[in-house]
Image (cartoon, rainbow, N blue to C red):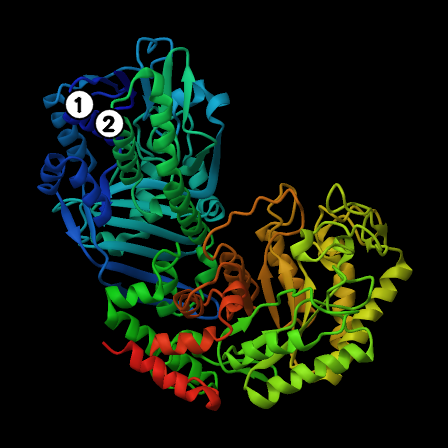
Amino acid sequence: MKVGVVGGGPAGLFLGILLRSRDPSYDVTVYERNAADDTFGFGVVFSEETLENIEAADAETLRRIEQRFRSWSVIECRLRIGNEHTGLQDRTMRSGGHAFAALARVDLLRILTERALELGVRLQHRRDVPSLAELSGCDLVVAADGANSGIRRQLADAFGPQVEPRRNKYVWFGTTAPFDVFTFLFRQTPYGLFQAHVYPYDATSSTFIVETSPETWARAGLDAYADSARRPGENDEASLRFCEEIFADDLRGEPLVGNNSKWLEFPMVRCETWHATHGDAAVVLLGDAAHTAHFSIGSGTKLAMEDSIALADALLTQPVTNDDLQTALKSYEEERRPLIASMQRAAQTSLEWFEGVQRYAALEPEQFFFQLLTRSQRVTYDNLKLRDPGFVRGLDDWFATRARAEGLTVRDGTPPMFFPFQARSVGLANRIVVSPMAMYSAADGVPNDFHLVHLGSRAVGGAGMIFTEMTCVSAEGRITPGCCGLWNDEQAAAYRRIVDFVHEWTPAKVALQLGHSGRKGSTRLMWEGNDEPLSGDNWPILAPSPIRYRPDSQVPREMTREDMDRVREEFVAAARRGVTCGFDWLELHYAHGYLMSGFVSPLSNRRTDSYGGSLANRMRYPLEVFDAVRAAWPAELPMSVRISAHDWVPDGITGDDAVDIAAMLKGHGCDLVDVSTGQTSTEARPAYGRLYQTPFADRIRWEVGIPTMTVGAVGSVDDANTIVMAGRADLCLLARPHLVDPYWTLNASLDSGYDGHWWPPQYLSGKTARRREQRP
């Protein structure tokens, strides 16, 4: 097998080592455009897991690398941040239990080069990226030539690359200043916030990456130094001196050192596929050529070398001939792609945190540091408790002290999810909420015994608040014939029975969610065909514009001013009935493509009058409805609104729009924003993943200054504790976990060893029995 590897960085060299060490019949040539003694960058960081993977793949390589390691287990955060309200906060904090190891990139390349040559890998330096025609004699071409891969570019139609430049500016430096651990520096300046990611890689040197927003970068005048005519390898000396001044206290008189250092924008690289054919050769992407992950969650070198291990395993697990080479490459991609997708989701969350870090400048240092440590959602409250119990105890004490200062009663040792929450006159015993979930089980809109048991059991199960499903304000506003409604007294009496049960037997609060289906109405029950139109007995539907939701959906009638007045009054009448039912909380459903969401999203609102066009115009009618309902709802009771913070469709609602929407709602007296996303278009492509919607709630909470609820893939006690402690949301809504465990919150109190939670007296014997089972 003749293999041509384009790119002589760590990934390409390590692949050659693995192939030749395990099967010397492989003929491997590595082509590198730079000289053998050239290097860019400073240090390379490895996690414990990556080191174990390298050892398993080639123990000799790890042995040599370890001799050059600089190791540490602490993350330090040095803050000098604030705003006009908080003043400048100057703190240094540390958290332990984080295992890292690093070495100089030049040392890593030297070690890998020596090992590769020993094993018979041929190295050709000072070679420009070969064309695929030049590599025509190879059976396999490996593109390990980085994020700007020339090989990927030559086969762009086959690989389907997507390269997204991120907005922040960053620049790589080195320094001989004394840093002994991974250190994050945050410095408020007259221009805005600058941050540095610093880590040691040998006894005297550290990598020093400076990052800032493009707005701060421009205000500081650094755009004047972005000279596109600068020669390759030439440093941006003016920016280097500027950064030395900003971080002078941390550098302690030591200089920053450049190495082709200039301001960059991080490219997020994704490809539809990682392998292809060209003539008789197979071509495969490796490392940054296939995917990138932001430097804030670790080293791209780590991912690239792990790709090399997986590719070598796929090729060497069994003898591979030219005929089944594509099968081996498919196996490599199938193994690595899910892991890379997960890593890229974490990296995206992390880089977006740094892009929006200015919003956290007003946080108290303890919460800021916790936000920083948990920004990618891979490190959590429980994970930190294992790494550094003393650090988390300090966080718990700070959180409790702050809550008491706000007038809340909190016992020592209370986990964050069991802290109380107050909105107007309504107090919730904890931060867990049963999310609205359509049951499609009502007859003529009347909730029945199923709803009593469904909602009642979850209230008995310990949640701080339970939500009704979206309750429709009219018969035509139903999604399906099985949806609950609140347009007549019979429905109100049925709901009153449920509310009375919850209030009599539990401390839980009960929230009413009101909505109108809009263009998603007159459809089948979920288990008969989700969003599919009824096969008969359809009722007419209406929407802001006559646009179908699905190709087979009805075309809705465009609402007239008379329709808008009528629907607004239906919302008001339903809210008034909600008062008679005794509900504690009211939420309006402005998400998921239903009527009000239809007005908000440009995908479904094409009106040319004052209710279409700009976001302010599209929000005009939803705000009219909110104002009318707020006036009818008791002033002492809270109101929230559920929004879709992102349509996940080009030209749809984005996170920026969600901030503006939340600000408008806050200005009209909304107490809390319930942050969901999507379900507004069949073309949506959500970035699914654990807690994938929480960053939107986080952003709205801090940029708008309004409490939020987060929903979507919140599934564990650890998730809830992390979200609440970090301040990413005030309340955590759980849907599916409550479907399989109505007593989720009671079980969470047992799992947490927390005795302060209310317990149904009828079930106390079960509580003690569970404790006996848990004893070793």
Camera-side residue of 248 and 748: 748
Secondary element at tag 1: loop
Above or below, 125 relative to 218: above
Q: Which mark is residue 23?
A: 1
Residue 253 is situated, as x and y percent measured from the top left of the image, at: 20, 51
Q: Is residue 592 visible?
A: no
736 to the left or right of 679: left
Secondary element at tag 2: helix
Query: Could you tell me if the residues under marks 2 and 1 are in contact, i.e. CB atoms within 8 Å?
Result: yes
Residue visible at 81% across and 73% down?
487
Quadrant of the image occupied by residue 169: top left
Residue visible at 89% across and 56% down?
560
Q: Quadrant of the C terminus?
A: bottom left
Q: Quadrant of the N terminus?
A: top left
Above or below, 382 relative to 452: above
Query: For mark 2, what is the residue?
Result: 316
Above or below, 704 relative to 617: below
Q: Which mark is residue 501?
A: none
Camera-side residue of 545 and 310: 310
Question: What crowding class fits label 1: few (fewer than 14 Cα within 10 Å), some (14-19), or many (20 or more)?
Answer: few
Residue visible at 14% across and 26% down?
21
Residue visible at 61% across and 82% down?
424
Camera-side residue of 577 and 261: 577
Residue 140 is situated, as x and y percent measured from the top left of the image, at: 32, 18
Question: How far separated are the C-alphas under marks 2 and 1?
Answer: 8 Å
Residue 496 is situated, as x and y percent measured from the top left of the image, at: 71, 83
